[in-house]
Protein backbone atom coordinates (compact mmCIF):
# COMPACT_ATOMS: atom_id res chain seq x y z
CA UNK A 1 0.00 0.00 0.00
CA UNK A 2 1.29 3.45 -0.96
CA UNK A 3 1.88 5.50 2.21
CA UNK A 4 2.93 8.76 0.58
CA UNK A 5 1.12 11.85 1.98
CA UNK A 6 -0.50 12.69 -1.34
CA UNK A 7 -2.02 9.19 -1.52
CA UNK A 8 -3.54 9.21 1.97
CA UNK A 9 -7.34 8.91 2.04
CA UNK A 10 -7.47 7.57 -1.53
CA UNK A 11 -8.73 4.16 -2.53
CA UNK A 12 -6.01 1.63 -3.21
CA UNK A 13 -5.84 -2.11 -3.58
CA UNK A 14 -6.67 -3.50 -0.15
CA UNK A 15 -8.80 -0.59 1.05
CA UNK A 16 -8.52 3.08 1.92
CA UNK A 17 -5.09 4.32 2.86
CA UNK A 18 -5.49 6.20 6.15
CA UNK A 19 -2.60 7.48 8.23
CA UNK A 20 -1.64 5.88 11.55
CA UNK A 21 -3.63 7.34 14.45
CA UNK A 22 -1.71 9.06 17.26
CA UNK A 23 -3.09 10.76 20.41
CA UNK A 24 -2.93 14.54 20.38
CA UNK A 25 -2.15 14.69 24.11
CA UNK A 26 -0.39 12.27 26.47
CA UNK A 27 -2.42 9.82 28.54
CA UNK A 28 -4.17 11.38 31.54
CA UNK A 29 -2.92 10.52 35.02
CA UNK A 30 -5.79 8.21 35.94
CA UNK A 31 -5.66 4.66 37.37
CA UNK A 32 -6.54 2.83 34.15
CA UNK A 33 -3.45 4.24 32.41
CA UNK A 34 -0.98 3.42 35.17
CA UNK A 35 1.13 0.32 35.63
CA UNK A 36 -1.07 -2.75 35.74
CA UNK A 37 -0.59 -5.48 38.33
CA UNK A 38 0.14 -8.82 36.60
CA UNK A 39 -2.58 -11.41 36.80
CA UNK A 40 -1.88 -14.42 39.03
CA UNK A 41 -0.97 -17.67 37.33
CA UNK A 42 -3.96 -19.93 36.91
CA UNK A 43 -2.05 -23.19 36.49
CA UNK A 44 -2.67 -26.05 38.91
CA UNK A 45 0.14 -26.39 41.42
CA UNK A 46 0.88 -29.98 42.34
CA UNK A 47 1.85 -31.02 45.88
CA UNK A 48 5.40 -30.05 46.78
CA UNK A 49 6.02 -33.60 48.05
CA UNK A 50 4.59 -36.22 45.67
CA UNK A 51 1.77 -38.30 47.17
CA UNK A 52 2.43 -41.92 46.35
CA UNK A 53 -0.02 -44.68 47.17
CA UNK A 54 -1.55 -47.54 45.23
CA UNK A 55 -3.24 -50.89 45.82
CA UNK A 56 -6.40 -52.92 45.39
CA UNK A 57 -9.50 -51.52 47.08
CA UNK A 58 -13.12 -52.67 47.38
CA UNK A 59 -15.28 -49.67 46.50
CA UNK A 60 -18.69 -48.75 45.11
CA UNK A 61 -18.21 -46.11 42.41
CA UNK A 62 -21.79 -45.83 41.23
CA UNK A 63 -23.35 -43.25 43.54
CA UNK A 64 -20.13 -41.60 44.67
CA UNK A 65 -19.23 -40.26 41.25
CA UNK A 66 -22.57 -40.06 39.45
CA UNK A 67 -24.74 -38.33 42.06
CA UNK A 68 -24.08 -34.80 40.81
CA UNK A 69 -25.08 -35.76 37.24
CA UNK A 70 -27.91 -38.17 38.05
CA UNK A 71 -31.56 -37.34 37.61
CA UNK A 72 -34.11 -37.53 40.42
CA UNK A 73 -35.13 -41.03 39.36
CA UNK A 74 -31.54 -42.23 39.16
CA UNK A 75 -30.81 -40.89 42.63
CA UNK A 76 -33.89 -42.18 44.43
CA UNK A 77 -35.21 -45.10 42.37
CA UNK A 78 -32.01 -46.84 41.29
CA UNK A 79 -30.35 -48.81 44.05
CA UNK A 80 -26.74 -48.56 45.07
CA UNK A 81 -24.30 -50.40 42.87
CA UNK A 82 -22.36 -53.40 44.17
CA UNK A 83 -18.87 -53.05 45.55
CA UNK A 84 -16.10 -54.16 43.21
CA UNK A 85 -12.35 -54.50 43.44
CA UNK A 86 -10.45 -51.73 41.67
CA UNK A 87 -6.80 -50.83 41.57
CA UNK A 88 -6.40 -47.41 43.18
CA UNK A 89 -3.46 -45.19 42.32
CA UNK A 90 -2.76 -41.56 43.29
CA UNK A 91 -1.35 -39.28 40.60
CA UNK A 92 -0.87 -35.66 41.65
CA UNK A 93 -4.12 -34.50 43.26
CA UNK A 94 -6.25 -37.31 41.80
CA UNK A 95 -7.03 -40.78 43.09
CA UNK A 96 -7.86 -43.01 40.11
CA UNK A 97 -9.71 -46.33 40.24
CA UNK A 98 -8.71 -48.77 37.48
CA UNK A 99 -10.15 -52.15 36.56
CA UNK A 100 -6.66 -53.55 36.21
CA UNK A 101 -3.18 -52.73 37.50
CA UNK A 102 -1.52 -52.84 34.06
CA UNK A 103 -1.62 -50.52 31.05
CA UNK A 104 -3.52 -52.86 28.73
CA UNK A 105 -6.70 -52.26 26.81
CA UNK A 106 -8.87 -52.24 29.96
CA UNK A 107 -6.49 -49.98 31.83
CA UNK A 108 -6.56 -47.08 29.40
CA UNK A 109 -9.54 -45.35 30.98
CA UNK A 110 -10.22 -45.23 34.75
CA UNK A 111 -13.49 -46.50 36.11
CA UNK A 112 -13.66 -43.46 38.38
CA UNK A 113 -11.60 -40.83 40.14
CA UNK A 114 -11.74 -38.33 42.98
CA UNK A 115 -10.00 -35.01 43.58
CA UNK A 116 -8.03 -35.30 46.81
CA UNK A 117 -8.32 -31.54 47.39
CA UNK A 118 -11.97 -32.07 48.36
CA UNK A 119 -11.02 -34.29 51.33
CA UNK A 120 -11.46 -32.71 54.76
CA UNK A 121 -10.98 -35.77 56.97
CA UNK A 122 -9.57 -39.30 56.76
CA UNK A 123 -9.90 -42.23 59.15
CA UNK A 124 -9.90 -46.03 59.47
CA UNK A 125 -12.56 -48.39 60.84
CA UNK A 126 -12.66 -52.17 61.04
CA UNK A 127 -15.63 -53.90 59.41
CA UNK A 128 -15.57 -57.67 59.76
CA UNK A 129 -12.48 -59.11 58.13
CA UNK A 130 -11.71 -55.90 56.21
CA UNK A 131 -10.63 -52.37 57.10
CA UNK A 132 -12.68 -49.41 55.86
CA UNK A 133 -10.99 -46.15 54.85
CA UNK A 134 -13.30 -43.16 55.31
CA UNK A 135 -12.61 -39.97 53.39
CA UNK A 136 -14.83 -37.08 54.46
CA UNK A 137 -15.55 -34.71 51.59
CA UNK A 138 -17.14 -31.29 51.25
CA UNK A 139 -20.76 -32.39 51.34
CA UNK A 140 -20.31 -36.15 51.27
CA UNK A 141 -18.12 -39.13 52.01
CA UNK A 142 -16.16 -41.74 50.08
CA UNK A 143 -15.41 -45.10 51.66
CA UNK A 144 -13.56 -48.13 50.42
CA UNK A 145 -12.23 -51.29 52.03
CA UNK A 146 -8.86 -53.03 52.04
CA UNK A 147 -7.68 -56.37 53.40
CA UNK A 148 -4.99 -55.32 55.85
CA UNK A 149 -4.54 -52.64 58.49
CA UNK A 150 -1.21 -51.41 57.10
CA UNK A 151 -2.91 -50.80 53.74
CA UNK A 152 -5.67 -48.78 55.40
CA UNK A 153 -3.11 -46.73 57.33
CA UNK A 154 -1.16 -46.17 54.10
CA UNK A 155 -4.23 -44.78 52.31
CA UNK A 156 -5.21 -42.67 55.31
CA UNK A 157 -1.71 -41.22 55.58
CA UNK A 158 -1.73 -40.32 51.87
CA UNK A 159 -5.10 -38.56 52.18
CA UNK A 160 -3.95 -36.64 55.23
CA UNK A 161 -0.81 -35.63 53.35
CA UNK A 162 -3.02 -34.28 50.56
CA UNK A 163 -5.16 -32.40 53.10
CA UNK A 164 -2.11 -30.76 54.69
CA UNK A 165 -0.59 -29.88 51.31
CA UNK A 166 -3.85 -28.36 50.06
CA UNK A 167 -4.32 -26.20 53.17
CA UNK A 168 -0.67 -25.11 53.00
CA UNK A 169 -1.10 -24.00 49.38
CA UNK A 170 -4.31 -22.17 50.26
CA UNK A 171 -2.54 -20.24 53.02
CA UNK A 172 0.31 -19.30 50.67
CA UNK A 173 -2.17 -18.23 48.00
CA UNK A 174 -4.07 -16.15 50.55
CA UNK A 175 -0.90 -14.40 51.67
CA UNK A 176 0.05 -13.73 48.05
CA UNK A 177 -3.40 -12.25 47.50
CA UNK A 178 -2.87 -9.87 50.38
CA UNK A 179 0.43 -8.78 48.92
CA UNK A 180 -1.15 -8.22 45.50
CA UNK A 181 -3.96 -6.24 47.11
CA UNK A 182 -1.44 -4.04 48.91
CA UNK A 183 0.43 -3.52 45.65
CA UNK A 184 -2.80 -2.68 43.87
CA UNK A 185 -3.74 -0.09 46.49
CA UNK A 186 -0.35 1.57 46.22
CA UNK A 187 -0.45 1.45 42.40
CA UNK A 188 -4.03 2.47 41.59
CA UNK A 189 -4.84 4.78 44.47
CA UNK A 190 -1.43 6.24 45.15
CA UNK A 191 -1.61 4.92 48.71
CA UNK A 192 1.57 4.73 50.75
CA UNK A 193 3.16 1.27 50.62
CA UNK A 194 2.50 -1.12 53.45
CA UNK A 195 5.32 -0.97 56.02
CA UNK A 196 7.67 -3.92 55.81
CA UNK A 197 9.59 -3.39 59.01
CA UNK A 198 9.92 -5.72 61.94
CA UNK A 199 6.78 -4.39 63.63
CA UNK A 200 4.47 -5.06 60.69
CA UNK A 201 5.92 -8.53 60.09
CA UNK A 202 5.41 -9.36 63.75
CA UNK A 203 1.80 -8.21 63.56
CA UNK A 204 1.14 -10.14 60.34
CA UNK A 205 2.49 -13.34 61.87
CA UNK A 206 1.00 -12.81 65.31
CA UNK A 207 -1.59 -15.56 65.11
CA UNK A 208 0.90 -18.06 63.70
CA UNK A 209 3.85 -17.29 65.97
CA UNK A 210 1.73 -16.38 69.01
CA UNK A 211 3.62 -14.61 71.78
CA UNK A 212 2.74 -16.20 75.12
CA UNK A 213 2.21 -13.47 77.69
CA UNK A 214 2.89 -14.26 81.38
CA UNK A 215 -0.80 -14.48 82.33
CA UNK A 216 -1.55 -16.91 79.51
CA UNK A 217 1.60 -18.84 80.39
CA UNK A 218 0.44 -19.36 83.97
CA UNK A 219 -3.06 -20.33 82.85
CA UNK A 220 -1.77 -22.82 80.29
CA UNK A 221 0.61 -24.37 82.81
CA UNK A 222 -2.21 -24.76 85.32
CA UNK A 223 -4.57 -26.34 82.78
CA UNK A 224 -1.91 -28.69 81.45
CA UNK A 225 -0.66 -29.77 84.88
CA UNK A 226 -4.25 -30.50 85.93
CA UNK A 227 -4.72 -32.68 82.84
CA UNK A 228 -1.47 -34.54 83.55
CA UNK A 229 -2.47 -35.16 87.16
CA UNK A 230 -5.84 -36.55 86.04
CA UNK A 231 -4.60 -38.51 83.02
CA UNK A 232 -5.95 -41.78 84.47
CA UNK A 233 -9.39 -40.27 85.11
CA UNK A 234 -12.16 -38.72 83.04
CA UNK A 235 -11.13 -35.30 81.67
CA UNK A 236 -12.39 -32.20 83.42
CA UNK A 237 -14.55 -30.23 80.94
CA UNK A 238 -13.87 -26.92 82.71
CA UNK A 239 -10.23 -27.06 81.59
CA UNK A 240 -11.16 -27.37 77.92
CA UNK A 241 -13.89 -24.74 78.13
CA UNK A 242 -11.34 -22.30 79.54
CA UNK A 243 -8.84 -23.29 76.86
CA UNK A 244 -11.40 -22.74 74.08
CA UNK A 245 -12.38 -19.30 75.38
CA UNK A 246 -8.74 -18.30 75.71
CA UNK A 247 -8.00 -18.87 72.00
CA UNK A 248 -11.36 -17.92 70.51
CA UNK A 249 -10.14 -14.34 70.40
CA UNK A 250 -12.78 -13.02 67.98
CA UNK A 251 -15.59 -14.64 70.03
CA UNK A 252 -17.24 -16.12 66.92
CA UNK A 253 -17.62 -19.65 68.37
CA UNK A 254 -15.21 -21.05 65.79
CA UNK A 255 -11.54 -21.96 66.19
CA UNK A 256 -9.94 -21.21 62.84
CA UNK A 257 -6.68 -22.75 61.68
CA UNK A 258 -4.49 -19.90 62.97
CA UNK A 259 -6.05 -20.14 66.44
CA UNK A 260 -5.61 -23.92 66.58
CA UNK A 261 -1.99 -23.59 65.46
CA UNK A 262 -1.33 -20.95 68.11
CA UNK A 263 -2.87 -23.22 70.76
CA UNK A 264 -0.63 -26.13 69.72
CA UNK A 265 2.52 -24.01 69.76
CA UNK A 266 1.73 -22.38 73.10
CA UNK A 267 0.94 -25.69 74.80
CA UNK A 268 4.10 -27.24 73.38
CA UNK A 269 6.14 -24.26 74.58
CA UNK A 270 4.76 -24.54 78.11
CA UNK A 271 5.35 -28.28 78.21
CA UNK A 272 8.88 -27.90 76.87
CA UNK A 273 9.77 -25.22 79.41
CA UNK A 274 8.61 -27.43 82.28
CA UNK A 275 10.54 -30.38 80.85
CA UNK A 276 13.76 -28.39 80.59
CA UNK A 277 13.30 -27.06 84.11
CA UNK A 278 12.82 -30.52 85.58
CA UNK A 279 15.77 -31.95 83.65
CA UNK A 280 17.99 -29.16 84.95
CA UNK A 281 16.84 -29.75 88.55
CA UNK A 282 17.43 -33.49 88.41
CA UNK A 283 20.84 -33.09 86.80
CA UNK A 284 21.87 -30.61 89.48
CA UNK A 285 20.62 -32.75 92.37
CA UNK A 286 21.22 -36.31 91.16
CA UNK A 287 24.31 -35.95 89.00
CA UNK A 288 26.45 -33.63 91.11
CA UNK A 289 30.02 -34.53 91.95
CA UNK A 290 29.11 -35.91 95.38
CA UNK A 291 26.49 -38.31 94.00
CA UNK A 292 28.82 -39.50 91.26
CA UNK A 293 31.58 -40.16 93.78
CA UNK A 294 29.27 -42.13 96.09
CA UNK A 295 27.29 -44.14 93.55
CA UNK A 296 29.45 -43.96 90.44
CA UNK A 297 28.05 -45.28 87.15
CA UNK A 298 24.93 -46.66 88.87
CA UNK A 299 23.56 -43.16 89.53
CA UNK A 300 24.13 -42.08 85.93
CA UNK A 301 22.59 -45.28 84.53
CA UNK A 302 19.52 -44.94 86.72
CA UNK A 303 19.05 -41.28 85.81
CA UNK A 304 19.24 -42.09 82.09
CA UNK A 305 16.74 -44.94 82.37
CA UNK A 306 14.14 -43.19 84.53
CA UNK A 307 14.58 -39.54 83.50
CA UNK A 308 16.95 -39.02 80.58
CA UNK A 309 15.43 -41.36 77.99
CA UNK A 310 11.76 -40.48 78.75
CA UNK A 311 12.74 -36.81 78.66
CA UNK A 312 14.30 -37.24 75.21
CA UNK A 313 11.09 -38.82 73.88
CA UNK A 314 9.06 -35.93 75.25
CA UNK A 315 11.49 -33.42 73.75
CA UNK A 316 11.18 -35.01 70.31
CA UNK A 317 7.40 -34.87 70.57
CA UNK A 318 7.47 -31.18 71.55
CA UNK A 319 9.90 -30.35 68.73
CA UNK A 320 7.43 -31.71 66.19
CA UNK A 321 4.76 -29.41 67.61
CA UNK A 322 6.92 -26.28 67.81
CA UNK A 323 8.54 -26.45 64.37
CA UNK A 324 6.76 -24.39 61.72
CA UNK A 325 5.91 -27.25 59.36
CA UNK A 326 5.06 -29.65 62.17
CA UNK A 327 2.79 -27.17 63.92
CA UNK A 328 0.89 -26.41 60.73
CA UNK A 329 0.46 -30.07 59.81
CA UNK A 330 -0.72 -30.96 63.30
CA UNK A 331 -3.10 -27.97 63.33
CA UNK A 332 -4.66 -29.04 60.01
CA UNK A 333 -5.13 -32.64 61.10
CA UNK A 334 -6.29 -31.65 64.59
CA UNK A 335 -8.90 -29.28 63.22
CA UNK A 336 -10.15 -31.96 60.82
CA UNK A 337 -10.65 -34.28 63.81
CA UNK A 338 -12.33 -31.60 65.92
CA UNK A 339 -14.77 -30.68 63.13
CA UNK A 340 -16.96 -33.76 63.44
CA UNK A 341 -19.89 -32.09 61.66
CA UNK A 342 -17.67 -31.45 58.57
CA UNK A 343 -19.14 -27.96 58.17
CA UNK A 344 -15.79 -26.14 58.34
CA UNK A 345 -16.38 -24.77 61.86
CA UNK A 346 -15.12 -25.93 65.27
CA UNK A 347 -17.67 -24.93 67.87
CA UNK A 348 -17.44 -25.20 71.67
CA UNK A 349 -19.36 -28.49 71.85
CA UNK A 350 -17.14 -30.14 69.22
CA UNK A 351 -14.00 -28.91 70.96
CA UNK A 352 -15.23 -30.08 74.36
CA UNK A 353 -16.04 -33.52 72.99
CA UNK A 354 -12.90 -34.16 70.90
CA UNK A 355 -10.08 -32.07 72.40
CA UNK A 356 -9.39 -34.56 75.24
CA UNK A 357 -8.87 -37.23 72.57
CA UNK A 358 -6.84 -35.38 69.95
CA UNK A 359 -5.36 -32.21 71.53
CA UNK A 360 -4.13 -33.73 74.80
CA UNK A 361 -4.50 -37.47 74.26
CA UNK A 362 -4.31 -39.78 77.24
CA UNK A 363 -1.17 -41.60 76.09
CA UNK A 364 0.78 -38.32 75.94
CA UNK A 365 -0.46 -37.23 79.37
CA UNK A 366 0.38 -40.65 80.83
CA UNK A 367 3.89 -40.46 79.37
CA UNK A 368 4.36 -37.03 80.91
CA UNK A 369 2.87 -38.18 84.21
CA UNK A 370 5.29 -41.13 84.35
CA UNK A 371 8.24 -38.84 83.65
CA UNK A 372 7.40 -36.33 86.36
CA UNK A 373 6.56 -39.11 88.83
CA UNK A 374 10.00 -40.62 88.21
CA UNK A 375 11.56 -37.21 88.81
CA UNK A 376 9.70 -36.76 92.10
CA UNK A 377 10.63 -40.27 93.27
CA UNK A 378 14.29 -39.73 92.42
CA UNK A 379 14.41 -36.38 94.22
CA UNK A 380 12.62 -37.91 97.22
CA UNK A 381 15.19 -40.72 97.43
CA UNK A 382 18.00 -38.19 97.20
CA UNK A 383 16.55 -36.11 100.06
CA UNK A 384 15.99 -39.23 102.16
CA UNK A 385 19.59 -40.26 101.59
CA UNK A 386 20.84 -36.82 102.63
CA UNK A 387 18.71 -36.96 105.80
CA UNK A 388 20.18 -40.35 106.72
CA UNK A 389 23.73 -39.12 106.17
CA UNK A 390 23.11 -35.93 108.21
CA UNK A 391 21.51 -37.98 110.99
CA UNK A 392 24.44 -40.36 111.10
CA UNK A 393 26.90 -37.52 111.47
CA UNK A 394 24.91 -35.95 114.32
CA UNK A 395 24.65 -39.22 116.25
CA UNK A 396 28.38 -39.59 116.21
Image (tube, rainbow, N blue to C red):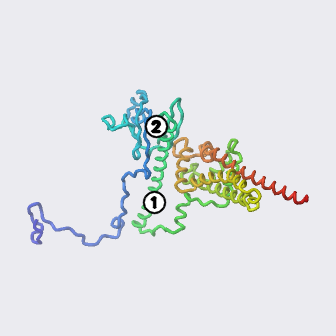
For label 2, the residue is: 142
Q: Report if residue 248 is visible in the image.
A: no
Query: Looking at the image, which residue is at 8% across and 63% down?
Result: 12
**For residue 341, above or below residue 39:** above
Q: Nearer the viewer, mark 1 or mark 2?
A: 2
What label sits on residue 359 in the rendered view? none
- Which quadrant is home to the C terminus? bottom right
Mark pair 1, 2: CA separation: 35 Å
The residue carrying mark 1 is: 178
Q: Please rate how many residues cluster around mark 1, counting C-alpha atoms within 10 Å: few if below 14, some from 14 to 19, many from 20.
A: few
User: Residue 167: x and y, percent?
Assistant: 48, 50
Q: Earlier in the sequence, mark 1 or mark 2?
A: 2
Can see residue 129? yes
Instruction: Tell me if mark 2 has few (under 14), some (14-19) or many (20+) residues whose alpha carbon lies within 10 angstroms of its own.
Output: some
* In the foreground, 24 or 254: 254
x and y percent of residue 39 in the render? 36, 59
The quadrant in which the N terminus is found is bottom left
- 297 relative to 264 in the view: left or right: right
Q: Mark 2: which secondary structure?
A: strand
Q: Quadrant of residue 113?
A: top left
Q: Is residue 3 above or below residue 155?
A: below
Q: Number of marks in the image?
A: 2
Q: Is residue 98 above or below residue 92?
A: above
Disc 1 is placed on an element classified as: helix
Outermost residue to the right = 395
Q: Residue at x 8, y 61 (%)?
A: 13
Q: Is residue 147 above or below residue 242?
A: above
Amino acid sequence: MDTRPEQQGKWQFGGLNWPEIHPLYPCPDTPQYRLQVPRPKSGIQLPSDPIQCEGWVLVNLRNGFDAQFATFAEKHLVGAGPEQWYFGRIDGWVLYFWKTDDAGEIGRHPAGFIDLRTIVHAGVLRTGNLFKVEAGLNGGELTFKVKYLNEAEMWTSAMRQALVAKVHQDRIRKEEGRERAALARSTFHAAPPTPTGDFSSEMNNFQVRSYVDPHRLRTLRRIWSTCVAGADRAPDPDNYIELYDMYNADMNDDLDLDEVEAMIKDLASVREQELQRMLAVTRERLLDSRQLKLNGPAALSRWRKEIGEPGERLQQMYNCYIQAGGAESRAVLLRSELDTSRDGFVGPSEFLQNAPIFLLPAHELLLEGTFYQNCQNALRRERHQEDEEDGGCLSM
